[in-house]
Amino acid sequence: MEISLDGKVALVTGGASGIGRGIAEMFAELGAAVMIGDLDMELAEEACAGIVEASGKAIVQELDVTSEESVGAAFERAVSELGGVDILVNSAGTGCMSALDELIVEEWDMVIDVNLKGSFLCMREAAKLMKEKGSGNIINVSSINDTVPIAGEIPYCASKGGVRQMTRAAALELGPYGIHVNCISPGSIQTPLMFEMHEIPEIREGILRQIPFGRLGQPEDVAKVAVFLVSDLADYVTGHTLEVGGGMHLVGEMSYLWPIERIMGNEVPDVPICQPPNAPEEE
């Protein structure tokens, strides 16, 4: 079956780079008109130009997902210039690395506001439009850490766990209106947010030991799953979370906190890097 998104309008938050950009580009390639919502307008313009050069349709919108006014303006423009919003992808996200006893409230608020509140605000506006139309697709981009904890990232784990459960609750509420709400939980994907982490040998090697497929993910790996979820192939799927991490969720995830503390010269407990489960010994 050939998948086409002709005639669809997609708003992708965090669409200027990383996973969001990969999704925006693939949606446009399949015929959707895409609004790239982001705070980094330089990168957003670059992403938009690439789509247009490839004969796709895209516009950029400066978007702060933590602001009701900014979110409302983005949806208003999508309606006026693109004709509506058929697909929402909540890909904007952030994180911080801090031990619990050193975590400051401002860090907690920042991560919760972007990852959880931002997804809620965008979902709320999308629901208004989609209920009137009687159809629509919402994809929330969560993380393996919505179920797999990682030391040093308590606000991130809390926010992504909230996104996963919020997806389920929204799917239950919006299903009767013909609206699909699903979640994608990526593992370790090569994005700007992760580049510095992946450059630390101890972390990179530890991560790769956690992935049964033995490679880091790429934004296209997540984009392909997003395409599936908004296509007719997933017409009977809602409230579901798809793990996209090469099997990483089966093993767990190493904690970045300890290697970073060692690099900084701080003394830390002798905590081993997580290892995949050992094969049972032969009798």
Image (spheres, rainbow, N blue to C red):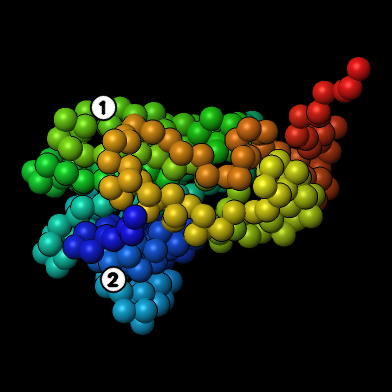
The residue at 43%/35% (across/down) is 241
Cβ atoms at labels 1 and 2 below 8 Å apart: no
**Quick one: label 1, few (<14), some, or many (20+) residues within 10 Å?**
some
Whether residue 62 is visible, yes or no, is: no
Q: Residue furthest front?
A: 1
How far across and how far down the image is residue 274, in percent? Answer: 76, 34
How far apart are the two marked residues, 1 and 2, measured between alpha carbons? 31 Å
User: Which residue is more in the foreground, 257 or 283?
Assistant: 283
Q: Residues within 10 Å of mark 2 (few under 14, many from 20)?
A: many
The reply to whether residue 270 is in sight is: yes
Q: Residue furthest right?
A: 283
Mark 1 secondary-structure assignment: helix
Q: Position of residue 185 (x, y in %)?
A: 49, 41
Left or right: residue 199 compared with residue 152: right
- Which of pointers 1 and 2 lies earlier in the amino acid sequence? 2
Q: Determine which of the numbered discs, if any, sits on residue 58 in the image.
A: 2
**Residue 172, numbered circle:** 1
Left or right, 104 with respect to 80, comes to right
Q: Give residue 174's quadrant in the image.
A: top left
Indicate the secondary structure of the residue bearing disc 2: strand
Q: Quadrant of the N terminus?
A: bottom left
The amino acid at mark 2 is Ala
